[in-house]
Every structure is written in structure tokens, then in C-alpha cells.
Amino acid sequence: MKHTESSSSPQVFKKAQPEEFDLVILGGGTGSTIAAWTFAGEGKRVAVVDRKYIGGSCPNIACLPSKNIIHSAKVASYFRRSKEFGIMCDGFAIDMAGVRERKRRMVRGLNDMYMENYRNTGAEFILGTGRFLAPRTVEVTLADGTTRQLRGANVIVSTGTRTAMEPIPGLAEAQPLTHIEALELDEIPEHLLVIGGGYVGVEMSQAMRRFGSKVTMIDRNRRLMSKEDPDVCDALRSLLVDEGIDILLSARIKQVSGKSGDSVSVVVVHNGDQNGEQRGIEKVLKGSHVLVATGRTPNTEGLGLEVAGVELTDRGYIKVNERLQTTAPGVWAIGEVAGSPQFTHISIDDFRAVHANLTGGNRVTTGRQVPYCLFTDPELARIGLSQTEAEAQGLAYRLFKVPMETNLRAHTLSETRGFVKALVEAESDRILGFTAFGAGAGETLAAVQIAMIAGLPYTALRDAILTHPTLVEGLISLFSSSASAHNVVETRGTQISAA
């Protein structure tokens, strides 16, 4: 006779056990994506959790989509300059829906490529919202409301940053564009008001102006890209003004009203006191759209970091040491959320550090080079020390500087705007820093950076045989030019006089 339990018998439920992984990655940015493929390719069981994007922000809503849009804007600028190149073009129209579709098509292709890499390496990509339940244990809520629990021998947090929204009265209610929405526009803004004069603000202002928008930039600082040398800031401002962009500097925003995409008003105090006192001239700017580009804030809310024992800095970023270890054993952080410089190539280098430290090595983030490129047209690129930084450190240096019009390749392109400059240590021939504002600046910078990595003197570039005519060939002219000495210092008994 078969025994049957009565309905009143107590039922025993077993608590779900977390799935075990060698590595769980919270946030699917570029550094963590490469980490997933690399560790999985080495035979580790790896899971990546991201709320929305395959590959994180870079291929979806940031670096690559923005450069895609910027290139479309450059093509538009060539149409406007067509007579300069001997090409007659009586008229043209911008189809923003077509511009957007080109960008979306690129993103879809990148997503497919990324998923193929996940399949080939064996890493698992999980689309969902993750948070810590316990040390090294993450709960993921999937789109259908179900959950999974993942426990990693190690966990990497790489949740990035988002646009910082300042507490300006009426700003949030105006539903402003961030770079994400700006890259999804299917219409040309009639008049775009851009709040912020940094990377995003400068790049998007030029692109939208080239598509046909009236553009007004508003920045609290006295100069655009205010951390750069004064000559760089002035050159950028001159570029944008020449393209018809209105720029208000030393401007404090008092209030925003209306709705972006319809009609919006921004009340600013122009040329006001830098300490925030209400001085200067009050203006009311009216536009159709407003874009906020005033900095970034880390994505740390709702992650359960306190449960995992992960501490934050006083600025809200995850606290890490030079090996990118957090305050919790077995938990690491990479990229922007760890306070690293906000560049994709730095998040990749962060991965290299973590990979080395998890496989028996000892790699740190201190003292590394941080190159960057602003993708205006022409580009701005820099590596190493700027003049401002060198002088703040009291370093004696020789300055080499030549205009882009000395570059013969630039003449063939009709792109002679800008300059290149380099800092060379006064006591030696070591290159301390390089800045280029001109056509192909990002590519030219790489040649100088490689020389710096190799520890080559500037004379190695000066005396090199470089292909003619190329933009990088301009380095010969740069380092063959006369140098001026900067900073008065006593060195080995001789005085180097300041220029």
C-alpha cells in the first residue's frame, strides 16, 4: 500500500543556493567585457550582469555612437565647403532620422559582435539588475521579475557613471537632454542650449551646429575645457565662435523653465562673481532644447555595497587601492565608478591591473600615462604634462611649438588650423608632454606616446625618417624648431632662464 502524506503535513523548503562562479562582474562596460572574455578564455566560469547594454556605454550610448554622429556632422561641413574643393553643390538637406539610423546600425553590429564573443569564450552575459546580498554574492533581478543568485570567488564592480544633474531650480522638470538623448534625436534642434563646456558639451555643440542648429553654450568657468592650457582653451573657443556658436563663460544658471524639445528658458548671470555672488548681467536665453553636460556622478546607489563591505570615498566613488582592490576581500572595482580617469582606454588598463593581480602578478595604476583626445574638428589630443601642470610643479622645461600650417600634409587637406607643442625636460632630452590641436591630432599623439613609453629622447623623433607627406611627419618640424626655456631654477650650478 502506497503511503500518502496528509495535507496537514509540514512542508520543508530548501533555501536556494547561489550559483558558483570564478568571477562575477557587476556592470558590463568595456573593461569588464574584456575581463569576461579573457578570464573565460582561460577556463574560468564568468558571469557579467548589466541592466541594459551589451558592452556597456562605450559602444551603445557614448564613445562610438558620439563619434559616429560627429563624423556625419563633418561630412555636412564638407558639403558646406564643397566649392573650396572644386565641387559644386547647390544645396543639401540633413535627415536626422537617417543620421540616427546610421548610428543605430553601427550599434546593432557591435552588439552582435559582442554576443558572438561571449558565445565563443563561454562567458555568460545576464541582462538584469544586480545588487549584493552578502559578501561576494550578487542577486540579479531579470526582466521577467525572477531572480538568480551568483557567488563569485572574486567580484568586479564596473557600473560606471551617469550625467550629473545640478540642483538648479526647474532643470529636472525641463526634462533636459543628456548625451544619451542627444544621440537619439530624429530632428535638428532649432536652438540648442548647452550647459557645460567640457568634453561632451564642446563635441555636441559643434556637431549640432554643423547639422544646422543654432547653439548657445553656457559654462561657469572662465574658459572652455578650463583644465587645459590657456592657448588650447582660446583656440577651441575661436573655433566654435568661427562656426557660429554663441558662448557665455563665467555664467551661473539661476533658473530653468519650460520643457526641452518644446520651448525652454534659462536665466543666467553672465560674468558673475566666481564665488557665486549675484553680480554681473542677468540674461534670459530661450531655446528649443537644452543639453546638460556638467560632469558625471558614480553609479553606486542600490548596489548593496554596504552589505558587501565595500566603502565609498567622500566623493561617492568606490574606494580602491593602487591594485584596484576595494575594502572587501575578493571584490575589485574598475573604470569610472572606481574614480579612474573617465576614458574607455583607462577602463581597459584597469582590467589589465586586476587580471595581473588575480593571476599572480602585481600591477598598479599609479604613474601610468593617460592620453586623451577631444573629437572636435580639428581634434585636440594630449599626453603627459601640460604647461600649466609643469609650472605648478616647478619643473624646468623647453617648449617646442609650431602652427599646423607648417605641416605640408595639412595643406593638401585644407586643414591648417591649430598647432602642436611639446615639453622637453630642461636637463635632458626626455619628452614630458605633448599637445596637438589640429587634423589627425589623436593619431599623431600615438607616435609621441610610444616614444615616451620607450624612453626615447625627442631627438629620435626629430631625426626619424617619416613618410612624406603625412601628418605625423610634422613631428620633425616641431622638434627641429627653436625651443624656449620656462621656469627659473638652479640646475647643476647653472641657471636656466625663463622665457
Image (spheres, rainbow, N blue to C red):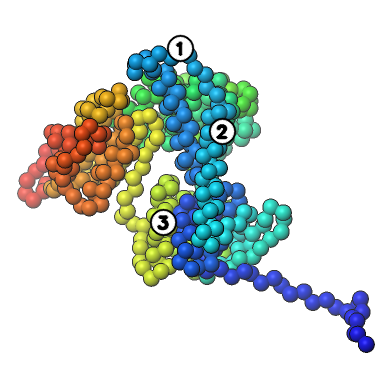
The answer for how far apart the CA atoms under marks 3 and 2 are is 33 Å
Residue at x 45% of width, y 12% of height: 90
Question: Three-letter amino acid code at disc 1?
Answer: Asp
- Most foreground residue, 10 or 94: 94
Residue at x 53% of width, y 57% of height: 118
| Residue on which disc 2 sits | 101
Question: Three-letter amino acid code at disc 3?
Answer: Asp
- Could you tell me residue 85's position as x and y percent? 34, 18
Residue at x 35% of width, y 63% of height: 363
Looking at the rendered image, the quarter that the N terminus falls into is: bottom right
Looking at the image, residue 256 sits to the left or right of residue 407; the answer is right
Q: Which residue reaches farthest top?
A: 90
Disc 3 element: helix
Question: Three-letter amino acid code at disc 2?
Answer: Glu
Q: Looking at the image, tell me whether mark 3 or mark 2 is earlier in sequence order.
A: 2
Q: Residues within 10 Å of mark 2 (few under 14, many from 20)?
A: some
Q: Which residue reaches farthest left?
A: 493
48, above or below 252, in the image = below
- Could you tell me residue 311's position as x and y percent? 51, 60
Q: Residues within 10 Å of mark 1 (few under 14, many from 20)?
A: few
- The answer to whether the residues at label 3 and label 2 have Cβ atoms under 8 Å apart is no
Looking at the image, residue 369 sits to the left or right of residue 283; the answer is left
Tell me which corner region of the image, top left, top right, bottom left or bottom right, holds residue 7.
bottom right
Q: Which mark is residue 350?
A: 3
- Most foreground residue, 59 or 326: 59
The answer for how far apart the CA atoms under marks 1 and 3 are is 50 Å
Looking at the image, residue 150 sits to the left or right of residue 429; the answer is right
Let me know if residue 233 appears in the view.
Answer: no
- Could you tell me residue 51's position as x and y percent? 61, 51
Q: Looking at the image, tell me whether mark 1 or mark 3 is earlier in sequence order.
A: 1
Q: Which mark is residue 90?
A: 1
268, above or below 297, in the image = above
